Amino acid sequence: MLQKILQDIMNNWVKASGEPFKDHPIALKFRRDFQGVIRKIVYDFDENYIVKASPGAGNWANVPWLSILDPKITKTTQDGIYPVYLFKSDGSGVYLSLNQGVTISSRELGKQRAREQAKKIKKNCLKYISGLKKWGVQEIDLKARTSLGKSYEGPNISAKYYDVNSLPDDETLKGDLEELLRIYRTIGSIDWLIGEEVEEKVFKFIETEEDILKNIESFNSKSKDHHARIGQLIYDSTYLVYDSATKRFAASKFAAFKGMDVDLYERILEGEFKSSRFDGTRTKNKIIQITGKEYEENEALFRELNEWGKNLLGDSFQIISVNKYKFCTVSSKHQEITNTHLKAALHLSKPFLLLAGISGTGKTRFVREQAKLTNPKGKLEETYCLVSVRPDWHEPSDLLGYTSRLSGKAEYIVTDVLQFIVKAWKEIIKSGIQFDGSAFKGTTEQLASIRPFWLCLDEMNLAPVEQYFADYLSILETRQWTWDGSRFSYSCDPLLKPAAFIEFFDTERFALQNNLGVHDSEELWNHFKANGISIPFNLIVAGTVNMDETTHGFSRKVIDRALSFDFGEFFPNNFDDYFKPSTQPKMLSYPLLSDAREGRAFFPNVDSQGKQSIDFLKAVNEVLSDTPFQLAYRSLNELLLSIISHEPQDDKLKLQAIWDDFLMCKVLPRIEGDLDKLAIKGEQANLLEALEKVLENQLSLIWDDEKRPDVYRETIDGKAVKIHCRSKKKIQWMLYRLEQSGFTNFWP
């Protein structure tokens, strides 16, 4: 079948490329038939690999290709090493090539240095990867007429050539691909290939405990990540499952366990069961489960290893006991964001923010900087997604995708937002948090390693939010956290029910998995199939808002479900601080509670059981009674969640500062109207004036002067910032607008 598909593509390529591209049978054969056959072979080998095919994008490619990517090495053809089928532009033949992506390195290093690096990687691959040099040819000629087509020729490492007139049979074609995939797996990372000297120990198998120490001592890396890589080697080499019959240890990817699938073993140790701290209880349990062998300690080996590790790395190296099993740990800033770092973040009371202010104040940049703060060691795009809202958005499918049949068959169109939501779920699963039906269960220790994922909807109200964001606004209120000591359970109704893409579970499964980004997580895919895709708890949605004649207003349905920030008040632009800022926003993170009743044990001493806050809200609500602005249980719950999140302890000033910000975020944005709407029956004072009078009493400690602490900002050296009462200033501003124009609202 593979032979026939290749023949059809090559025999018809020249003719087809002179005809319209859209829906052409050869383009469809390339994407469906060819990609489908290769994907089956690849997924039988490793279902985590990514298969991508391109006969062109809108127009015919001069050199069509199909690539196979190991996500541990690269997720894009623009970088890293990957196997790829490259077709000659004249249709006379096709290469199966181990090739390199050089687009990103050319951009970062310049074309000349990128070419030199590619040559170095090619040289090291051919020198140190056994059998690669003899496997294929090192030079290829694609007969390319474009610079893009020619750019595939130089980075080729080794390739097999198939002439269209003498194609081998299916069995040979499949065998060649499987052989290249086995070679590809040994690469692991291209970091070591860039250096001048490469340790051949990476590809050796270890059979005895003496070999383990011998190979550890031979490891010598000159890279800047030396410390972290030594730690990784120690981790690999001390995961010992002892086979008493053969007197051999299985030690990660460096050893074969008798009677076991070594490829499967490597995937376990390098994949989802691997601990980021090298202690690996879950990995150990998975090894025992699959091998059926119990773990036995070798005290002499551990004593020698401990002495060696201490000499090399000092006190950062430790051998620890976990459930009576010993493992190595290496404490290093290179290896992970520490629990302390994420614990320093302020957990929001709600994961949906509205950032309102005049244009140019830095609202979008604020979201971007928050993503950097909570992910200092990773790439920005890992936890940050910027989406520009279009004026013609009117339904949830603009954000969450839809089924299209324009091509003659059904396919689910996956959006950037949906892919980002799935990425946030993958972060959760990676931490070890487990499924229990539609709920997710874990511990505070696991939460400490889960980063917030920031989705920024830029110019959010260019389109009517109540329409295109309706599903999120409804489902947001179904989030449910429950706590039992240090253990938690999280559940949420689905944004996308399984019925939305059930027709793709079988016929277009692989395409949908690839597009969603769950090709490497069968566990998560099965959860989506059974329960749909819900809101991940580490997703924070921040919408930037401008209020002018080109934008839409917000209904109370939206305002009630969001934290609304008058950006100029909370994060003011101080021109004197432009070159040398004196303050900075605090680091923000996702909520850990949905119901304040679940967090009663966390109420601070200054407001035990939240009684003072309840009395405060009752006083405010008395002014708002019999108006459209009256508050309900949701507002009370979110006020109490704010008290728990900000932890005022014994500080009465801070308690009133939290009340002040709650008014700014949740109460005052609801109030708008003319003199008639804001009039109070039987009273001369209008609603804003009456509210001002009540607040002067309720916020007496912070009402005058700059007394209250800013709970969202701090000085550059981490000290408290003192500011004026925000709600007092805002009410006076709203009263001034009402007096001048006869109408007022909260928005700047």
Image (tube, grey):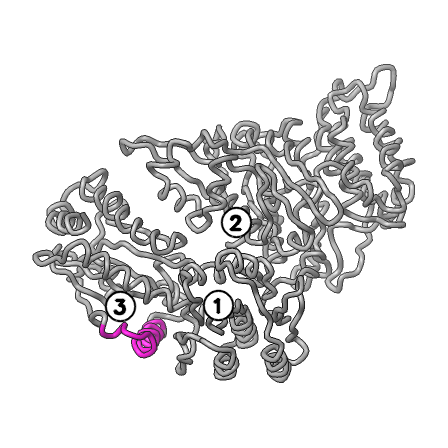
Q: Nearer the viewer, residue 385 or 41?
A: 41
In-image side of 38 versus 289 (left or right): left
Which quarter shows the C terminus?
Answer: top right
- Cα distance between the residues tagged 3 and 2: 33 Å
Q: What amino acid is at disc 1?
A: Ser
Q: Position of residue 220 (x, y in %)?
A: 49, 82
Q: Position of residue 449 (x, y in %)?
A: 63, 56
Q: What amino acid is at disc 2?
A: Lys
Figure quadrant of residue 93: bottom left
Q: Is residue 128 magenta?
A: yes
Q: Is residue 68 magenta?
A: no
Residue receiving disc 1: 252
Please give the range of residues in magenta.
114-134
- Please, is residue 558 above or below residue 14 in the view? above
In-image side of 656 versus 286 (left or right): right
Q: Secondary structure at mark 1?
A: helix
Q: What amino acid is at disc 3?
A: Asn
Specify which label sits upstream in the sequence, 3 or 2.
3
Residue lying farthest to the front in this orientation = 245
Q: Residue 143 shows which numbered tag?
A: none
Q: Position of residue 40 (x, y in %)?
A: 30, 49
Q: Residues within 10 Å of mark 1 (few under 14, many from 20)?
A: many
Q: Is residue 707 visible?
A: yes
Residue receiving disc 2: 426
Residue receiving disc 3: 156
